[in-house]
Image (cartoon, rainbow, N blue to C red):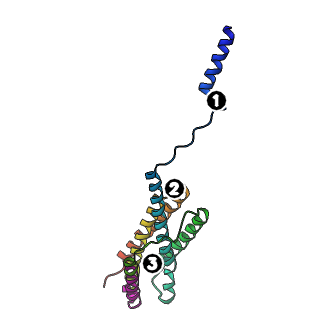
Amino acid sequence: MYVKCLLICSLAAGEMFCGNANAQTPPAPMKSDSETSKDASKIEVHNNAASLLYDLLGDEKDVSKILIIRRRPARVSRVIKAISKTAGDGQDQIDALAKEDKTLDLHALQLPPGETATRDAIRKTKEHELLFSWGMKFDMNLLLSQTDALDYGSHLAKIAAENSTSPEQVRRFHALDVALSALFVRVVADIRAVPVK
């Protein structure tokens, strides 16, 4: 009787410490409405920042084409070619991320009409400044336009990284942020090197 009692107690203790094999695992706790809303908001911000960055990189990858019609000093040409290459590579990386993750929507620009009109006006003004400037003034206008684009792109990449739920996307958007920031610093240094007349 003592042995039987000891055996029953041992089995009960084993179940307590090891868990009953037949016991069901409790379901994972459901997310609250506020958590679900926060996740949806984070995805929306991520997609919007990634879309704006993708669009910007599409423009920037072609900036070196201006060197076909305007030969510039090697210092300016090198940085402009580096910007084009970084932008083209960055756009390819974002394309690859969108193929891997179907929740990454690269068409979520969501700009209000006033913002779209303002961007178009700024683009036309900058094009006019570049077309009707020569020599060092052209170099200055070109480099200044790149500081705006690189600073904006770097911040978009940072926001996309901060709002990503995928570690791989965080890593890649962070790398783009770093690359664009480094180019920004390089362009600012080149602006300071342009002789003032």
Q: In the image shown, does 66 or 111 lie closer to the viewer?
A: 111
What residue did someone put label 3 on?
Answer: 75
In percent of width and height, residue 78 lies at 49, 77
- The boundaries of the magenta stretch are 118-137
At 58% from the left and 62% from the top, the residue drawn is 101
Tell whether 68 sits left or right of 138.
Answer: right
Tell whether 37 sits left or right of 20.
Answer: left
Residue 139 can be seen, yes or no = no
Rate crowding at label 2 as few (under 14), some (14 to 19) or many (20 or more) other CA atoms within 10 Å: some
What residue did someone put label 1 on?
Answer: 20
Q: Earlier in the sequence, mark 1 or mark 3?
A: 1
Q: Of tags 1 and 3, which is closer to the observer?
A: 1
Q: Are marks 2 and 1 in contact (CB under 8 Å)?
A: no
Residue 45 lies in the magenta stretch: no
Q: Earlier in the sequence, mark 2 or mark 3?
A: 3
Task: Specify the quadrant that holds the N terminus.
Answer: top right
Quadrant of the rendered structure where residue 122 is?
Answer: bottom left
Q: What predominant SS class does the magenta segment belong to?
A: helix
Marks 2 and 3, how far apart at CA: 40 Å
